[in-house]
Image (spheres, grey):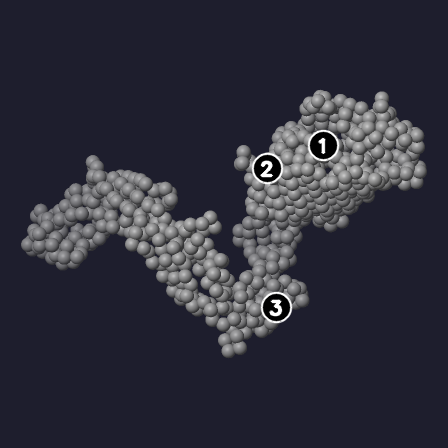
Amino acid sequence: MRVFLYIYLCLFVTLPVCAFESFTVKDIRLEGLQRTSVGTVFNYLPIKVGDTLNRDLSVRAIRSLYKTGFFKDVRLERENDVLVIFLAEKPAIASITLEGNSDISTDQLKDALKQIGLVEGRVFNRSLLDNIKIELQRQYFGLGKYGVNITTNITPLQRNRVDVDIRIAEGAKARVYELNIVGNQVFPTTKLLSQVELSGVSMFGGRQNYSKQVLTADIETIKSYYLDRGYINFSVDSTQVSITPDRQDVYITLNVTEGDQFTINKIKLAGELILDQKEMMSLLEIAEGEIFSRKNVSISRSKIITRMTEEGYAFANINIVPDIDKTRRTVELTVFVDPGRRVYVRRINISGNTKTRDEVIRRELRLFENSAFSTKLVADSQTRLNRLGFFESVNVETPAVPGANDLVDINYKVTERPTGSLSAGIGYSDQNGALFTFAVSQENFLGTGKRMGVNLSNSQVSDKYSIDYTDPYHTPEGISRRLSIYSENFDATELTATSNYTTNSYGASVHYGIPVSERQSLSIGAGYKTTELIPGGTPATEITDFITENGDAYSSYTVDLGWSFDSRNRAIFADEGNLYSVSAEYAMPGGDLEYSKVNLRYVQYLKLSDKSALMLNLLAGYGRGHGDTEKLPFFENFFVGGSRSVRGFRAGTLGPKDSLGNAIGGSSRFVGNLELVLPNPLSEQSSSTRFSLFYDVGQVFGDEPPYTRNELEFKKSVGVALLWLTPVGAMRFSLADPINAQPGDETQKFQFTLGSPF
């Protein structure tokens, strides 16, 4: 067609050129240019001043100018010895309008059109119209929309420009009517279809929408299914996708060849083995005599690479090469180890900390400048920073140093959260009356990482004043020290649901935390406290009997021991890891009272997705008296119920009752909380809010039989909870339904606290 065009132009359009005699060109003049520069034309024009223009050269000149794609008409004329070239430019694209597209964004479609040359500002070529339709159909066919209809409208504008209007009727997605697999003998079709997405029927019934991308992924899933079970030579030989005439349904047929199943005959190590050979073999998820599995081979490779990076070989290359024996149907695997150069840390950079001192952050890091690089230690350092509770987020990057293949920088970027807490609680009930608590604490005092807390709590029930000071690095080795003094007046006579007494107490204590490993720590402490017990107007028998046996004023010397293991990924809003802790308090001989208390806690987080997790919290406690103190003093009892234990029941009201029918607590307790953490539907600020569904169970028990049925029965509740970290402290909301509340139980379906601890 193009040759015919050239002949046509020569015979009709450029007839003067075909008729003139050869001549020497003394000058060249261009006519008709609007947008194209003169320089551009002369770059493509094969004629120069001084050339002899003949028939062949003139045809070549016309061909060259047409090939630029800029012109729709080219004509050569002679005026004496001047060559005059008349040029009619093609129109430019002023704008491209897309209408009717919803499944594919306008930007994505314009990028696709750009690939075929349809861009605003460029020359418009009508030959592109067919290509426009083909390219857009290709985009929609990939989504399974085979009924798409595309129309184009070209509107001429002034100054030789055009508007391109593309209207799209996307239509409905084609559905998968049937997916059939042919050639499978080992695994039934139903088993294979259960592995893929385009199986024909969705989980909610009905047919699934077809997508070429999903089909490609499904084919790879079936291939992986076979390769993970030893069928090394498995292949999908062909894929047929048939579309019904109405373009609404597709039939898919996969023709497969399964091949033979192979087992691993031998595993060899080769290359530069940095690690001990025995350790290398222990990292492998494959073994001689087992069926070959591509998945396990990949896992083995990843585990070796991870272990190598822990030793500083950040760019280790591990290749597991198979040697297939088709006759014996076995595979010999050779693990080639190329550790590369050992990588060292050049600099550790910290940014984003406007309040927290650098030294507070750096002392948590487990890598140092000039030390060997280790991805494990980088991750451990990030976890330790998260567990401080000072930061909303901690991000880390490890860019390579330009020009050096054995150096990296480590960049920690932190986003600080408010570490000062103004905690307050205000409430009212027909039993407790008005309540008020006030506390000021600074978890990161003056950016030093030390904690200072002042607590002033006042209500109709209690007045408590305390000062706490914690230095997490009392020694350079990381031994912490916490100093505490307090004074408390507890007036249970204001409560109608608990025993009738008042206690006045004050004391002081010192505790030390001793790190054992990255995740384990020990604690030891000692304290002194005095307590004055004042019975109410009508005291219960349990209170008067205790005063008769032990008096009404007591001094106690206590020692505390504890052990904890903490692998949570952060202190606040954790979603991975666990926490185990055991603590014991013993009131020693020499004081007026002798007793001991033991607390056990187990917390497990299971991450389900980026914004959801499952949390299990178990808490158990036991106490008893020693020496002349026959049983645990009732004012040291455990209490259950409330927003921190079994929600839906009023705080401290579960368990044994005294002789007047009021809650008196017990010497042992058990609490279990199961929470499903979900994205907060009210806010996207997941760093400051947490929404959960919960199931609580718990009870507190006395130490003297006979027990009533209600005492032995665990109380249960279900509900929803919201935790919101505000500038003035943590706000907890819960709406609970007590499942097995009995007559006489103090229930409280909605509970709210402000400033409660974690």
Question: How far apart are the two marked residues, 3 and 2, measured between alpha carbons?
Answer: 45 Å
Question: How far apart are the two marked residues, 1 and 2, measured between alpha carbons?
Answer: 31 Å
Closest to the camera, between mark 3 and mark 1, is 1
Q: Residues within 10 Å of mark 3 (few under 14, many from 20)?
A: some
Dividing the picture into quadrants, the one containing residue 106 is top left
Name the residue rendered at 31%, 52% in the picture. Answer: 247
Disc 1 marks which amino acid? Pro
Sequence-earlier tag: 3 or 1: 3
Label 1 element class: loop
| Residue identified by numbered label 1 | 743
Q: Tell me: residue 632, above or below residue 74.
A: above
Q: Which of 38 and 640 is in front in this view?
A: 640
Q: How crowded is mark 2: few (under 14 residues within 10 Å), some or many (20 or more)?
A: many
| Residue identified by numbered label 3 | 287
Q: Can residue 447 be seen in this view?
A: no
* Mark number displayed over residue 731: none
Q: In this view, does 218 lie to the left or right of 434?
A: left
User: What percent of the width, then of the height, locates residue 253?
Assistant: 39, 61
Sequence-earlier tag: 3 or 2: 3
| Residue identified by numbered label 2 | 691
Q: Tell me: residue 466, above or below residue 124.
A: above
Name the residue rendered at 57%, 67% in the picture. Answer: 336
Disc 2 marks which amino acid? Phe
Q: How crowded is mark 1: few (under 14 residues within 10 Å), some or many (20 or more)?
A: few
Sequence-earlier tag: 1 or 2: 2
